[in-house]
Image (tube, helix red, strand yellow):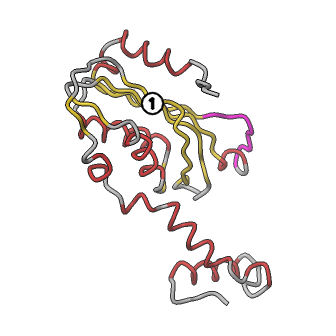
Amino acid sequence: MSDVADPITGLVTTLLKELGEDPGRNGLVKTPERVAQSLRFFTEGYKQNPRDILKGALFDVDYDEMVVVRDIDFYSLCEHHMIPFFGRVHVGYIPDGRVLGLSKIPRLVEMFSRRLQVQERFTSQIAESLQDLLQPKGVGVVVESIHLCMMMRGVQKQNTFAITSSLRGEFENDPKTRSEFMELMKHQKASFA
């Protein structure tokens, strides 16, 4: 039987009973532990800080053209129903004397996705963190996703995508910069095979 000393495990055991299940039946014996482990993994972003993720990866470089990292896969849990939503994040910024190690952008996306989220806040948190910590001339973030809460329940629409954006600095104020960024989002994914 499940270890009820773990509060989440105990809550899942109670939940199974409330749903009319027998937590002691063969297929469910380990379910409370598995759910507790999964929820801790899905929400480990609460234990992380953007400064810690980005520290040591800021480099002084004389470069002032747009840097874009596209098609960053993410998985998150909707805070309203705790049902997954997932998709891709596209991030661009214009350096102002400093660049960020490219692998840190997907790490930042991962950190914010590992929290209970709404897509709009998720999009803004990525942009705000990059703006605050990197101090670039501008930041643009676009998130495209599908929400299982809209597919499995409620309106039950299977082919609905949600797209959000957060634009800062030149991406917000300069139509040419914004247009260039949005145009780069339309390009096909590169193939290096």
Q: What stretch is highlighted in magenta?
A: 154-161
The prevailing secondary structure element of the residues shown in magenta is: loop
Quarter placement of the C terminus: top right
Residue at (37% x, 63% y) in the render: 47
User: Could you tell me the amino acid type at mark 1?
Assistant: Val
Residue at (26% x, 25% y) in the render: 95
Quarter placement of the N terminus: bottom right
Q: In this view, does 52 lie to the left or right of 68?
A: left
Q: Please state the total of marks drawn on the protein image.
A: 1
Q: Which of the 4 image quadrants contains residue 127? A: top left
Q: List x then y, in percent, for residue 165.
A: 45, 30
Q: Is mark 1 on a helix, strand or loop?
A: strand
Q: Is residue 156 left or right of residue 67?
A: right
Q: Front-most of 61 and 46?
A: 61
Q: List x then y, in percent, for residue 178.
A: 39, 16
Q: Is residue 180 left or right of residue 5?
A: left
Q: List x then y, in percent, for residue 183.
A: 50, 15
The residue identified by callout 1 is 69
Residue at (25% x, 28% y) in the render: 136
Furthest-front residue in this view: 193
Q: Is residue 192 above or below residue 134?
A: above
Residue at (41% x, 41% y) in the render: 103
As for residue 145 lying within the magenta part, the answer is: no
Q: Which of the 4 image quadrants contains residue 122? A: top left
Q: List x then y, in percent, for residue 140.
A: 38, 27
Furthest-right residue in this view: 26
Q: How crowded is mark 1: few (under 14 residues within 10 Å), some or many (20 or more)?
A: some
